[in-house]
Amino acid sequence: MNTIPFLNPAAQFQNLRAELLAATAAVLEGGRYILGPEVQALETEIAAFCGARHGIGVNSGSDALTLALHALGVGPGDEVITSPFTYIAPAESIHQLGARIVFADIDPRYFTIDAAEVRRRLTPRTKVILPVHLFGQGAPLAELFEFGLPVVEDTAQAIGASAGGRPLAGQGRIGCLSFYPTKNLGACGDGGMLVTSDDNLATLLRRSRVHGISQRYHHDTHGFNTRLDELQAALLRVKFRHLASWNQRRRDLAARYHAGLADLPVELPLTAPGNDHVFHVYAIQTDRRDALQTHLAERGIPTIIYYPVPLHLQRCYADYGWKVGDFPVTERVSNRILPLPMYPELTDEQVQQVIDTIRSFFA
């Protein structure tokens, strides 16, 4: 029995070893380690790829979210609407700025925020809508734009995806990207970026990431210390050249999973009309999730649940008074979802092993 890693960033390094080591050496020998030419070049490349004019490299996707909300003036007394079914970063960024987190339940078909639920939660205090492009496909941006409020796109899991024929991240006022190592475009450490076509916001964001500095030792605004390392930018530029083929490989693997699991009593992930899905995560649903997870693990296929405890039920938000039943779609999905191994280096044989193991569970 061969064990199949759930994630495998090391395999990607081995495939690109010579290119990545050469890029590393060039940066180290050049002696420019913070906000140098590699960062500037990556910002230009990623912004254009996302359909935006400006890219602003930062330390992480989480910092990108915080800076985006800060640039839009979010603070105490404001409300920001986001999803309860995602990693904590969007809610955390709202909390860090003293604003109130407002959750809207998700669409059961696509796991992204439900625009009808957003409409129900709009108030005069709503300052920003923060949808998450979850698992590799877009939230319903066209519907969200109709509300006339700034939209910050959390595109941490969906670089290279599109909605309505346009790239994600570049459609809202600001798009936020994560380069965490396991993302579709992952650094060899941490990293993130904001993209925007608003010239004034771009200027403010560049200033905010470096202590509010307009020129050295002159601080025009309150800011942060969150810069994308030159070394990570160089490595990301190497990897960025492969992103399109990696995303296509993810689509191909998803199609293989679809074909192999279609006749089983599980719900397969769906792609919303008009969306291009890049399958950061391939997640099935079943009422027998926990037993199936154990069955897979015992046969060398570990899995990780995204997300076992919805954000509204996390202990850190107990003071909000949210309870079980407040967001029923999110809670149902959290109890039934099972992500399967998904990364470009996964072989066809490994995918077939996963499929066969799942099929043996239901036999």
Image (cartoon, rainbow, N blue to C red):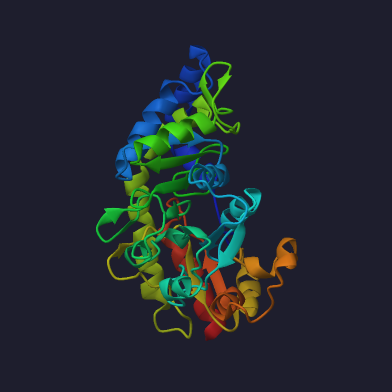
- Residue appearing at x 57%, y 57% in the figure: 78
Residue closest to the eye, 106 or 96: 96
- Residue appearing at x 45%, y 24% in the figure: 23
> Residue 73: x, y in percent?
52, 46
> Residue 320: x, y in percent?
70, 67
Residue 296 sits above or below residue 222 on the image: below
Is residue 159 something one can see in this rendering? yes
Is residue 235 something one can see in this rendering? no
- Residue appearing at x 39%, y 33% in the figure: 43
Which quadrant of the rendered structure holds the N terminus? bottom right
Residue closest to the eye, 192 or 231: 192
Residue 331 sits above or below residue 175 on the image: below
Residue closest to the eye, 287 or 196: 196
Q: How many marks?
A: 0
Residue 333 position by quadrant: bottom right
Residue furthest toward the left?
165
> Residue 143: x, y in percent?
34, 67
| 146 to the left or right of 355 | left
Residue furthest toward the front?
124
| 349 to the left or right of 9 | left
Residue 93 sits above or below residue 79 on the image: above
Residue 312 position by quadrant: bottom right
Residue 302 position by quadrant: bottom right
